[in-house]
Image (cartoon, grey):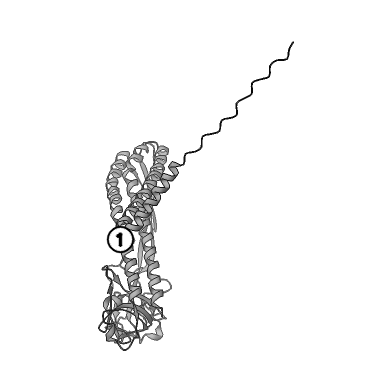
Amino acid sequence: MARNSYTETTRKGFGKRLTDSIGAAVIGGLMFIAAFPALWWNEGRAIGEYRALKEGAGAVVHVAAAPVGAGNEGKLVHVSALVEGAPELVDDDLDVSVDGLALRRVVEMYQWQETRDSKERKTLGGGSETVTEYKYETEWNDDPIDSSDFRYSDEHANPTEWPLSSATFEAEKTTVGAFVLSDATRAAVGEWRDLDAAKALRFPDAYEQFRGIGSGRLFSGADPEVPEVGDMRIRYEYQPEETFSIVARQDGETLDTYTASNGRSVLLVEPGEMAAAAMFDGAQKRNTMITWAVRAGGMIAMWIGLAMVFAPISRVLDILPMLGTIGSWGIGLVTGLISLVLSVLTIAVSWVFYRPVLGVTLILAVLAAFLWLRGRKPAPPSMPPAMMPPPPPPPL
């Protein structure tokens, strides 16, 4: 029986660790430099998206799903109606069919999966000792897992050939009322749901090794409750015909991406019936969330990159492990503060470029506050009153 857990210990000397840290410092320097244009780009993207959505919110026109109004040609329109697909979706390999927007056959195999957990411990003299634990567990996965990359692959080999693979079948034509959806609009529509047995026509005997196990699923193996490596199972998902709200450009009978005056694209899709104003409000909120996420990611990338640049210093200090640990914490704290300041400064300068009025106003406000605080000189401390001379001594 194959072992499912292995432990290895590797050691690295001071010279090797120092050389590795120097190489990492080069990569860190590139990360640090790349963070600046990324933060700058993000501010431009956020402002451009905000203006495009604001323009779209003021230009959108609500229309009925049918008939197509020729007077709205080229305009940004809003429609809420049932999205339908045609013709019927069919998987010819297994003769499964359903009405919907798309059908997906998901083929999974029971396979070995390797996980690695490494813990490094510093040793006296600047070296290190790394203990790595390799664990092997079995799981269902719809992607082939290449076991040749495993550390212990001989006892944990996965099959390399699949008799059947996953596949997706999309409706040839997707419509909402009298409108046809473009490829971009179609890609934004639809939600995947499990296809139950009642909606599937039948599972034929095209693949004799598969058998039904309920809920519209097929299984290949001895026991579906106790699967073995190499066993396979098949399930289906589909995108049902449902009501969606769409904001897009009317191009003849097609709903396609709208281009705002600043060149940015506007295409909004939400499930169910939703007013255009609510859709634009939700898009603005998503834009804000993305902006803050990229800001945080840029600052963290700058922090990690800068810390990697100074990592060789901590490697030298690792000659005494405790000193190296203190050095690493210190470098992390200092580089974190520097990255925060530089990130905020980059964003502020980009605002001067993208939002001149607001950016200059903020900078002037900060400068005025600094000058005001600097000009507030503390009042000199009051001198204590002069002491009265002591009374003359009494006459003798």
Residue at the top extreme?
Answer: 396
Label 1 belongs to which residue?
A: 44
Whether residue 384 can be seen here: yes
Is residue 154 visible in the rendered image? The answer is no
Q: Helix, strand or loop at disc 1?
A: helix
- In the picture, residue 205 is in which quadrant? bottom left
Number of residues whose C-alpha sits closer than 10 Å to that of mark 1, classed few (under 14), some (14–19) or many (20 or more): some
Question: Which residue corresponds to the image point at 36% horizontal and 51% vertical from the top-left?
Answer: 363
The residue sitting at 32% across, 55% down in the picture is: 352
Q: Position of residue 52 (x, y in %)?
A: 31, 69
Quadrant of image for the C terminus = top right
**Is 137 located above or below residue 123 in the figure?**
below
Which of 22 and 132 lies nearest the eye of the viewer? 22
Vertical arrangement, residue 271 with respect to residue 9, above or below? below
Residue 191 placed where, x, y %? 37, 77
Work out whether residue 53 or residue 26 is closer to the camera in this orientation and state it. 53
Q: Quick one: 206 or 289, which is closer to the camera?
A: 289
Q: Is residue 310 above or below residue 188?
A: above
Residue at the outermost bottom position: 67
Residue type beneath disc 1: Gly
